Each structure stands twice: as structure tokens, then as C-alpha cells.
Amino acid sequence: MLRATFVSCVVGSLAGCLAVPAIEPTIPALSGQVSRSGIPVAGAYILVSKRFEVVACQNTRTVAVTDSSGNFFFAGEKTLQLAVLGGDPVPHWEVCIEYDGRIWPGFRPFGFGLQEKMQLQCDIDKTNATEWKGICG
């Protein structure tokens, strides 16, 4: 029995299919600045959601508030993954900015893979922002 278990583990690891617990980022560490036409905005709320909806900025929670220089920092989130899936993960998180009673879509990642850290520059006076192309870059 021990030999069968050992052989299964060796074969599984060689095939790249062995499920090993791993802590993976679900939302990267975020830092950056919120401004209005280049002037730093203090007191803006940085909102995140682990998954985005059809309508931007639903089911978000506050993770940071900008300081007097408009800067913010969020340490990110990681989760324990008990299964190893082939390929890069598809990110499903989003950032929104709330200030003066208004909420703007900030950033939604596209593509595959998940970064560990992101630097965002957000301008609440950006005129071409949409739900899918927010005010942060």
C-alpha cells in the first residue's frame, strides 16, 4: 500500500497534476494616487470587489482612504488554493473610487495571470471613463 501511494505521488508530480496547497493572490497589493485634474484628492475611498459584475462597482468594500497627498495603499488579498489548475488564473477583481458622494469605476484587469503588486494613477476628472475602462491607469 505504501509503495502504491509513493508511485502515485511520483507519477502525479511528473505529470504536473499533483494538487499541492498554495497561497495565491486573489487581489494584488495596490498603491497609487487619486487626483482631480492633477491635484491630489484627500479622503477618497478605495473600494475593491473580488469579482466584478455586469454593472461596475457592485458588492465592493472599502480597503483604503487617500491621505492628504492623495496616496493610498492596500496590502492585497491571498487565498489558500487546494487544487492546482492548469494555466494562468483569470483575474475577476475590480477597483472603484468613491469621493464626494460619487463612485467611479477605477480599474478592471483583462487577460490572464495575476500580478502581485499594482501601481494605479486615478483621475476623477477623466472624461472618457466607462464601466469597463475606468479612471485609473
Image: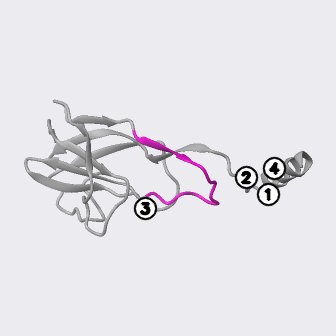
Tag 2–tag 1 contact (CB < 8 Å): yes
Q: Is residue 79 magenta?
A: yes
Compared to residue 90, the image places residue 61 above or below, namely: above
Q: x, y (%) of residue 15?
A: 79, 57
Q: Which mark is residue 9?
A: 4
Q: Alpha carbon of mark 1 to alpha carbon of mark 3: how far?
A: 29 Å
Q: Residue furthest right?
A: 3
Q: Main secondary structure of the magenta part?
A: loop
Q: x, y (%) of residue 118?
A: 40, 43
User: Which residue is pictured at 25% across the width and 67% down the height?
Assistant: 55
Residue 117, can we see it? Answer: no
Q: Alpha carbon of mark 2 to alpha carbon of mark 1: how far?
A: 8 Å
Mark 1 lies on a secondary structure that is loop
User: Which residue is pictured at 68% across the width and 51% down the height?
Assistant: 19
Mark 2 lies on a secondary structure that is loop
Q: Which residue is mark 1?
A: 15
Mark 3 lies on a secondary structure that is loop
Q: Which residue is mark 2?
A: 18
Q: Residue furthest bottom?
A: 54
What is the crowding at mark 2: few (fewer than 14 residues within 10 Å), some, or many (at least 20)?
Answer: some
Q: Amino acid at mark 3?
A: Phe
Q: Alpha carbon of mark 1 to alpha carbon of mark 4: how far?
A: 10 Å
Q: Alpha carbon of mark 3 to alpha carbon of mark 2: how far?
A: 28 Å
Q: Which residue is mark 3?
A: 110
Q: Alpha carbon of mark 4 to alpha carbon of mark 3: how far?
A: 35 Å
Tag 2–tag 4 contact (CB < 8 Å): yes
Q: Nearer the viewer, mark 1 or mark 3?
A: 1
Extent of the magenta region: 76-91
